[in-house]
């Protein structure tokens, strides 16, 4: 009789342990893959037959050992002039005083794309001396339906990782 009451709780604890263990493992893989990608990216090397950013994304996929579907992951690589610019939006004149940019308000188009941007980062692995932020976000599919109602959303759990580095100085070919 006691087993009938204890078994569901025991199975739920076991399922939760497995789920959280896998989530933590995938999180560590994503973080270490970004670290390895950033270590390559700061050098400015361009591999034969690939562009630098494609190689970096392939490296992230390789380092996550197939547990992260790179095609389904949201990978963002943005470059900035300084660390202080990371995540900063373009300056604007807040005409109505609501603290947010609204269409039609005057702004300083820092990246020259003719629209106001919430983040001044330029897509790509950057140039010599620039600061680069590598981000990955992935919706991990939970392994068991037992833990699904308690963690995550609709059978998925969002995992993200990021790293910011400054590229080494390098000579560009003329």
Image (cartoon, helix red, strand yellow):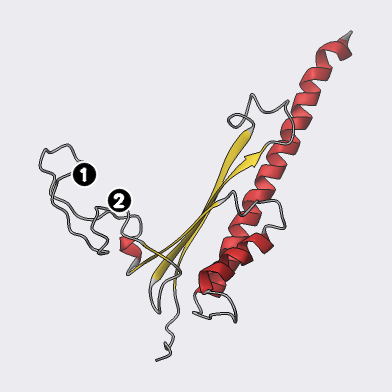
- Is 31 or 68 nearer to us in this picture? 68
Residue drawn at (45%, 79%) of the image: 168
In the image: residue 129, left or right of residue 106: right
- Is 50 or 134 nearer to us in this picture? 50
Q: Is residue 154 above or below residue 77?
A: above
Q: Which residue is denoted by mark 1 in the rendering?
A: 101
Residue 63: x %, y % from top left: 67, 62
For the C terminus, give its image quadrant. Answer: bottom left
Residue drawn at (64%, 31%) of the image: 155
Q: Secondary structure at mark 1?
A: loop
Q: Is residue 170 above or below residue 37?
A: below
**For residue 13, what is the image quadrant?**
top right
In the image: residue 82, left or right of residue 70: left
Residue drawn at (55%, 68%) of the image: 54
**For residue 70, what is the image quadrant?**
bottom right
Identify the residue at the far left of this view.
95
Tell me, for residue 118, which label it has, or none: 2
- Is 159 or 111 nearer to us in this picture? 111
**Dot 1, how many residues are within 10 Å of its Cα: few (below 14), some (14-19), or many (20+)?**
many
Residue 38: x %, y % from top left: 53, 68
**For residue 11, what is the image quadrant?**
top right
């Amino acid at each position: 009789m006691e087993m009938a009451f204890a078994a569901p709780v025991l199975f739920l604890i076991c399922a939760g342990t497995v789920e959280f263990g896998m989530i933590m493992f995938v999180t560590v893989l994503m973080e270490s893959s970004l670290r390895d990608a950033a270590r390559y990216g700061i050098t400015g090397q361009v591999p034969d037959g690939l562009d630098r950013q494609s190689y970096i994304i392939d490296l992230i996929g390789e380092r996550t050992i197939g547990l992260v579907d790179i095609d389904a992951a949201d990978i963002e690589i943005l470059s900035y002039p300084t660390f202080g610019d990371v995540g900063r939006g373009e300056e604007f004149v807040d005409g109505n005083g609501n603290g947010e940019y609204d269409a039609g308000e005057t702004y300083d188009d820092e990246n020259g794309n003719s629209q106001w941007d919430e983040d001044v980062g330029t897509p790509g692995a950057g140039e010599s001396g620039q600061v680069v932020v590598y981000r990955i976000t992935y919706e991990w599919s939970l392994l068991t339906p037992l833990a699904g109602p308690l963690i995550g959303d609709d059978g998925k759990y969002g995992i993200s990782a990021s790293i910011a580095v400054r590229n080494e100085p390098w000579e560009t070919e003329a």
